[in-house]
């Protein structure tokens, strides 16, 4: 498991590099200018210890799973463990900008299944930053196998669903199983979202010819 070298070398090059060299051959491997942890728990411990000092670089350069699973906004309460890194208000913008960046890489399922989305306070904050940072290219490109509107419709997040309904192409786009967002919401029993999607929908058949009426 590798944590990007720029985090160590550009910020506190000597102190961090000297400490990690001492672990080389056991818990740390070196590759050019990279330090690679051989144990995930150790990586979490080290990252937790240094994060307060170099939090901006942690947010910018850490791996996707760190952003989603280890960093948490301190103004939003969710269950935490000993490895949790809290993001304060002064770094909120950078944190959400990075989440939007990951989202644009088609990490839809991982982004919206993240625990923080269950907190009502968190979702309007994320929507605000998606409005701010989502690129024009995102709204014009073809979504992947699990488009964002499918994911949030299946999870029952009406506020996110409303946000993505501004893209008319998503409404009737099919996922890898041939389902459109309406089918995803119906199968999970999210009636409020079903109503919103029906009001904006034009074609409701999936690959198997199943429509909204037969799924209710």
Image (tube, helix red, strand yellow):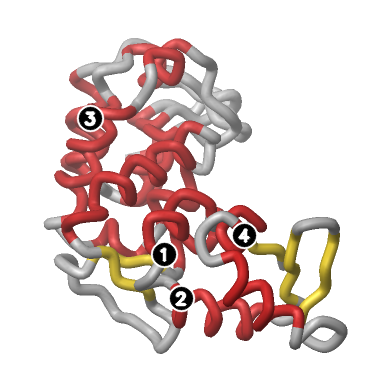
Q: Do the residues labelled 2 and 3 touch (CB within 8 Å)?
A: no
Determine the image quadrant of residue 99.
Answer: top left
Q: Going from the N terminus, do you reach mark 4 or mark 1 first?
A: 4
| Residue 36, position as x, y percentages in the image | 75, 68
| Residue 82, position as x, y percentages in the image | 41, 88
| Residue 177, position as x, y percentages in the image | 61, 34
Residue at 24%, 28% in the rendered image:
132
Q: Are marks 1 and 3 in contact (CB under 8 Å)?
A: no
Determine the image quadrant of residue 124.
Answer: top left
Q: How far apart are marks 1 and 3 (CA)?
A: 33 Å
Mark linked to residue 54 = 1
Q: Distance between the residues labelled 1 and 2?
A: 7 Å
Q: Distance between the residues labelled 2 and 3?
A: 36 Å
Q: Which residue matches tag 2?
A: 50
Q: Do the residues labelled 2 and 4 touch (CB within 8 Å)?
A: no
Q: Going from the N terminus, do you reach mark 2 or mark 3 first?
A: 2
Extreme residue toward the front, this view: 14
């Amino acid at each position: 498991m590798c944590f990007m070298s720029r985090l160590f070398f550009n910020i506190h090059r000597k102190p961090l590099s000297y400490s990690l060299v001492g672990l080389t051959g056991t818990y740390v491997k070196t590759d050019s200018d990279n330090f690679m942890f051989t144990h995930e728990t150790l990586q979490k411990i080290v990252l937790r210890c240094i994060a307060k000092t170099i939090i901006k670089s942690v947010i910018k350069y850490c791996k996707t799973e760190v952003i989603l699973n280890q960093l948490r906004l301190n103004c939003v309460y969710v269950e935490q463990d000993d490895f949790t890194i809290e993001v304060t208000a002064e770094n909120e913008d950078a944190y959400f900008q990075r989440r939007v960046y990951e989202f644009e890489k088609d990490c839809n399922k991982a982004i919206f299944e993240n625990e923080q989305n269950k907190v009502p306070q968190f979702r309007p904050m994320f929507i605000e930053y998606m409005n701010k940072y989502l690129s024009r290219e995102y709204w014009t490109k073809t979504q992947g196998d699990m488009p964002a509107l499918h994911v949030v419709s299946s999870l029952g997040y009406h506020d996110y669903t409303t946000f993505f309904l501004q893209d008319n192409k998503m409404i009737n786009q099919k996922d890898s199983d041939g389902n459109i967002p309406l089918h995803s919401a119906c199968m999970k029993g999210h009636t409020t979202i079903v109503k919103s999607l029906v009001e904006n929908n034009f074609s409701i058949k999936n690959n198997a010819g199943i429509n909204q009426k037969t799924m209710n």
